[in-house]
């Protein structure tokens, strides 16, 4: 008996010792601090890092759960397994999406062990509208605290600085999406590990501005050769920019160092696909809505069998009372047929993807929207690689709010979505993607009338419907085989259909603008809209071209599902427009509306002035002495010179006549009439010399274009900053200014 008791006690002790101390014992102290964004601020619609610091006096194993609200009522719950040694502090960074319908966001974190809550915390952050959020790499700060907020290079807001630590960088590029600018020492990039450096460069390619504390023309270790700053100290890098700061950060010269960055085109870009990606994904997944004729025929057969045949046959045999049995059996049989047809349709459905693959000299970034159907209900699961983050849905996704659960584990990021039987679920993720090759494009402005270049496909598969898009123009060059290269040309004086968005010009058969869309095409306009909406800067501007091609032969790195994967991918790249040999062309001037005080809680004030950045081509060299700022005469203009806005009064019309400010009627060279601010042409018109008027087709109310001589120093560093106002008569908003590109640089006629 004693032996049995001894053995039992020993077994009990061993079993108790084998249980991991997952839950915090009674009396243990566990503290949790939550910090989100950068300096308590974030960018609406862009993912934001949530830093959770856990401090405990005993070993703790559990899960950290962070809940956030995405757009359109979606909720995203992110779970990370954590282990905190006793007497230590553990910091975990979780990247979550943010909505666009609020400027204030609360993020909640809960620490659990064995399913029970141990402790919790929350943080509230606000959207920054007129502030530039600047992250500083470790080599810049050298252990010091970030500097205090400082004024921007022009009077358009302030810069707020924050330190970037190992935890934030380990989650790049998603953790950096809330930043506008990153500051780097000369050696910071080279000192990062490969995956982290890839994440930082992917952030630049998506529209970020990288400041490197080197002299202009000095090589930056870790930066791709095409992105090395030129003699003027700056160069375009994807949708972003790299700029040299000549030791200003090391010397602590923060006031006036950071420039305002461009604003994007909103959640959908310029072209809104009314049918969105949901229908595209459902079609690719194999879901088919039964035709109305089939449904009508099914109901007719049911009515004929249920009523005339069943009841008539039974009554003729004198067994009418059996109708109470026959009718339910007929209904059950037809229900079984309908259920079987639906189950077969669900069984044949596949997992569909619609992917944007953005290729750059620094690598590739993918944004994947996945659609999948639930055959039997429950949780649908998809696994993505490390550094991929859930991004919620796009604005074109319909249906009820989605509930997404993302778990960060050793296999990567697992996204789960609870679906009812037969429900079709859609979610979106983003992250670095391996790509064997790229889509490459070059562009040169050949005078004022056209842009030309070459496009090359170095990917291992062909691309269909390849198009070149620039400003308001586009041309479709067709199919590019693997390894193939083609020349292209865009005419800039072909304004007959100015009202058409470039997407319609590029892919008219699927845009649905003036004809029924071709649903069999590999092209999906909703994917282009998603690319524009996700970008941190406006994609189609003067000074930049984009090339986009389509394929069904590429699949994103998606796993964790038994269903086969199908869908389509848009491969896209961008490049700056070189100036050419014919002098300064407006087509080579990167013209962007930048963030400024006109933005309040993300909403512009159309009576307030806008700030426009006009960057000369990257070739560097001296600024031409006869460069002028061109804009309609009805706009009020000022340029930034020597630390102040200097108003420009009057200007020179294309015909050589000086005109003052203000709209109204006038006449310029070549039979061009200006009536009520709209532009029209007489037969036989000869277009005037000098930069193209912003809109020959009419639609802008500010009158004819005039050229203004720039004050000395206005183009310092290869950039002109212009403040634009519509005056008291007309309001002006960022979309109008971008849509018509009312302000540009050019040489005097």
Image (tube, rainbow, N blue to C red):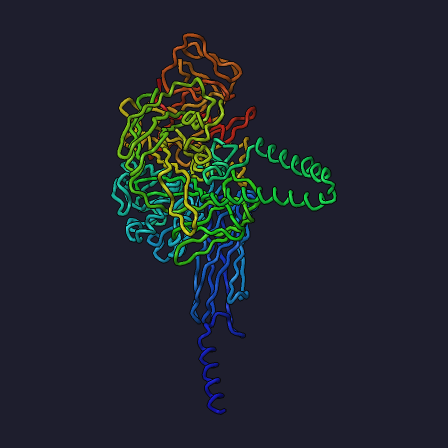
Which residue is more in the foreground, 701 or 318? 318
In the rendered image, the residue lying farthest to the front is 317
Could you tell me if residue 155 is visible in this image? no
Q: Position of residue 31 (x, y in %)?
A: 50, 66
Lateral position of residue 635 relative to residue 622, left or right: right
Q: Position of residue 645 (x, y in %)?
A: 44, 32
Q: Residue at x 47, y 64 (%)?
A: 54
Which residue is more in the foreground, 606 or 570? 570
Lateral position of residue 431 relative to residue 729, left or right: left
Q: Quadrant of the C terminus?
A: top left
Residue 520 vs 79, above or below: the answer is: above
Q: Position of residue 523 (x, y in %)?
A: 42, 32
Q: Position of residue 572 (x, y in %)?
A: 36, 36
Residue 403 vs 397, above or below: the answer is: below
Which residue is more in the foreground, 4 or 606? 4
Lateral position of residue 340 relative to residue 18, left or right: right
Which residue is more in the foreground, 703 or 416? 416
Numbered circles on residues, count: 0
Q: Residue at x 62, y 35 (%)?
A: 301
In the rendered image, the residue lying farthest to the top is 684
Q: Which quarter of the picture shows residue 152? A: top left
Q: Which quarter of the picture shows residue 522? A: top left
Residue 137 vs 302, above or below: the answer is: below
Q: Residue at x 40, y 25 (%)?
A: 473
């Amino acid at each position: 008996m004693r032996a049995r008791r001894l053995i039992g006690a020993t077994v009990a002790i061993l079993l108790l010792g084998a249980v991991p101390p997952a839950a915090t014992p009674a009396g243990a102290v566990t503290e949790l601090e939550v910090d989100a964004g950068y300096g308590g601020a974030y960018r609406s619609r862009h993912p934001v890092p949530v830093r959770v610091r856990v401090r405990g006096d005993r070993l703790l194993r559990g899960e950290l759960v962070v809940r956030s609200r995405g757009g359109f009522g979606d909720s995203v719950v992110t779970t990370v397994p954590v282990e905190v040694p006793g007497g230590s502090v553990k910091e975990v960074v979780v990247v979550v999406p943010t909505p666009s319908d609020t400027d204030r966001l609360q993020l909640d974190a809960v620490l659990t062990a064995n399913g029970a809550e141990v402790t919790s915390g929350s943080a509230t952050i606000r959207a920054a509208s007129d502030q530039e959020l600047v992250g500083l790499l470790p080599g810049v700060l050298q252990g010091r605290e970030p500097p205090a907020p400082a004024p921007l290079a022009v009077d358009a807001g302030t810069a707020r600085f924050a330190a970037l630590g190992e935890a934030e960088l380990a989650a790049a590029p998603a953790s950096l999406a809330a930043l506008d600018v990153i500051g780097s020492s000369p050696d910071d990039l080279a000192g990062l590990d490969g995956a982290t450096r890839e994440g930082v460069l992917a952030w630049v390619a998506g529209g970020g501005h990288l400041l490197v504390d080197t002299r202009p023309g000095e090589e930056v270790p870790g930066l791709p050769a095409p992105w090395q700053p030129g003699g003027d100290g700056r160069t375009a890098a994807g949708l972003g920019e790299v700029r040299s700061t000549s030791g200003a950060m090391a010397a602590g010269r923060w006031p006036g160092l950071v420039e305002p960055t461009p604003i994007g085109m909103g959640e959908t870009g310029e072209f809104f696909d009314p049918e969105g990606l949901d229908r595209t994904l459902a079609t690719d997944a194999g879901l088919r809505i039964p035709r109305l004729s089939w449904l009508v025929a099914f109901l007719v057969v049911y009515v004929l069998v249920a009523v005339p045949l069943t009841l008539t046959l039974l009554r003729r045999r004198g067994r009418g009372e059996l109708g109470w049995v026959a009718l339910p059996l007929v209904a059950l049989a037809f229900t079984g047929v309908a259920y079987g047809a639906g189950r077969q349709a669900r069984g044949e459905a596949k997992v569909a993807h619609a992917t944007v693959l953005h290729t750059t000299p620094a690598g590739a970034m993918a944004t994947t929207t996945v659609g999948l159907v639930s055959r039997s209900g429950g949780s649908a699961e998809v696994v993505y690689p490390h550094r991929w983050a859930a991004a919620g849905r796009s604005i074109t996704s319909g249906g009820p709010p989605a509930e997404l659960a993302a778990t960060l584990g050793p296999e990567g990021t697992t996204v789960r979505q609870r679906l009812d039987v037969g429900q079709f679920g859609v979610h979106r993720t983003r992250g670095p993607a391996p790509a064997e090759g790229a889509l490459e494009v070059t562009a040169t402005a050949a005078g004022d009338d056209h842009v030309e270049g070459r496009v090359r496909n170095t990917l291992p598969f062909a691309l269909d419907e390849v198009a070149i898009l620039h400003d308001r123009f586009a041309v479709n060059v067709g199919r590019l085989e693997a390894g193939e290269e083609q020349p292209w040309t865009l005419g800039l004086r072909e304004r007959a259909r100015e009202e058409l968005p470039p997407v319609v010009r590029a892919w008219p058969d699927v845009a649905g603008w003036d004809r029924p869309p071709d649903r069999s095409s590999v092209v999906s306009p909703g994917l282009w809209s998603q690319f524009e909406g996700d970008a941190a800067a406006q994609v189609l501007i003067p000074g930049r071209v984009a090339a986009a091609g389509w394929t069904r032969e590429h699949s994103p790195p998606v796993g964790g599902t038994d269903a086969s994967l199908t869908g389509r991918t848009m491969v896209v790249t961008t490049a700056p427009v070189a100036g050419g040999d014919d002098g300064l062309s407006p087509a080579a001037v990167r013209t962007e509306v930048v963030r400024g005080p006109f933005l309040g809680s993300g909403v512009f004030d159309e009576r307030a002035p806008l700030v426009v950045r006009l960057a000369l081509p990257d070739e560097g060299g001296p600024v031409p002495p006869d460069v002028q700022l061109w804009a309609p005469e009805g706009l009020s203009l000022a340029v930034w010179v020597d630390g102040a806005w200097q108003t420009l009064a009057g200007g020179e019309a294309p015909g050589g006549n000086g005109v003052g400010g203000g709209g109204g009627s006038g006449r310029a060279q070549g039979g061009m009439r200006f009536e009520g601010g709209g532009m029209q042409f007489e037969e036989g018109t000869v277009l005037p010399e000098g930069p193209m008027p912003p809109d020959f087709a009419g639609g802008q109310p500010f009158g004819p274009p005039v050229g203004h001589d720039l004050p000395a120093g206005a183009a310092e560093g290869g950039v002109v900053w212009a403040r634009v106002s519509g005056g008291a008569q007309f309001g002006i908003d960022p979309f109008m200014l971008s849509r018509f590109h009312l302000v540009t640089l050019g040489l005097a006629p």
